[in-house]
Amino acid sequence: MNHRVIVAGAMLLFAVMATGCSSQASSPQVALRGRIDATMVEQVASALAQGHRDFTIDSSNGGYVFSAAIISGLLRGRGASLTATGRCWSACTLVLFGVERKRATAEADIRIHGAAYADGRSGDAPAQAAVQFMIANGVPRALAEQHGWGINLYRLTPSDLASAGITAAGPTDL
């Protein structure tokens, strides 16, 4: 596990929780793009500290399961919303699953697969952790277990998204 992610995530989580910010942000949405990692954890924590509560995500091929858990915990803890507007694969999908107020546009491409160790080690602990995370966040057990172990990306259907509590977002929601 990347210790930089652990330390950065823990420090930012405590900092954001301690600030108790209730100010309103000057911009209604924060656009998240790219790798789910310590940098995105910092971006989310900073935006939340500034009072932002609406986020969009696209152009993400995924990243780290631990970072996904931290980001979704930060967003959930502040009652923030997250809308997938484009590519949201792998750990990005875990972030979406972990947020209470989650939506997806018709253009969103949301995919999951089994997690693996970032350094290439063998073992199923990352996939097991990801499956447990999905189930704990309302993803039906059958969906999590069927697609959370495989190596191939599975594109979630509208029915899959609805069963995981992800609602459809229209143009007026953005």
Image (spheres, grey):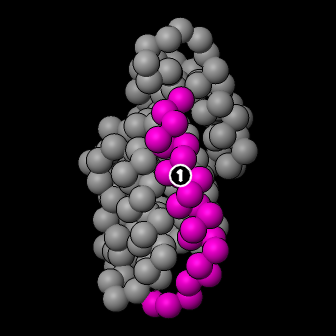
Report the span colored magenta.
1-24
Q: Secondary structure at mark 1?
A: helix
Mark 1 — residue?
9
What x and y, as percent, mark residue 58?
31, 53
Choose between 14 and 34: the one closer to the eye.
14
Which residue is painted at 48% across and 73% down in the image? 48
Amino acid type of the residue tagged 1 in the rendering: Gly
- Image coordinates of residue 94 in percent, x first then y, are 53, 44
Sort mark 1 into few (<14), some (14-19) or many (20+) by Cα contacts within 10 Å. many
Residue at (53, 61) in percent of width and height: 12
Task: From the top left corner, tell me how far across and down residue 126 is, in percent.
Answer: 59, 25
Figure disc tally? 1
Instruction: Work out whether residue 64 or residue 128 is closer to the camera in this orientation and state it.
Output: 64
Residue at 50% in and 90% down: 23
The quarter of the displayed image where residue 101 is located: bottom right
The reply, left or right, for residue 107 in relation to residue 153 is left
Asked if residue 95 lies left or right of residue 18, the reply is left
Task: Give the x, y percent position of residue 108.
Answer: 34, 51
Dividing the picture into quadrants, the one containing residue 11 is: bottom right
Q: Is residue 22 magenta?
A: yes
Q: Is residue 123 magenta?
A: no
- Quadrant showing the C terminus: bottom left
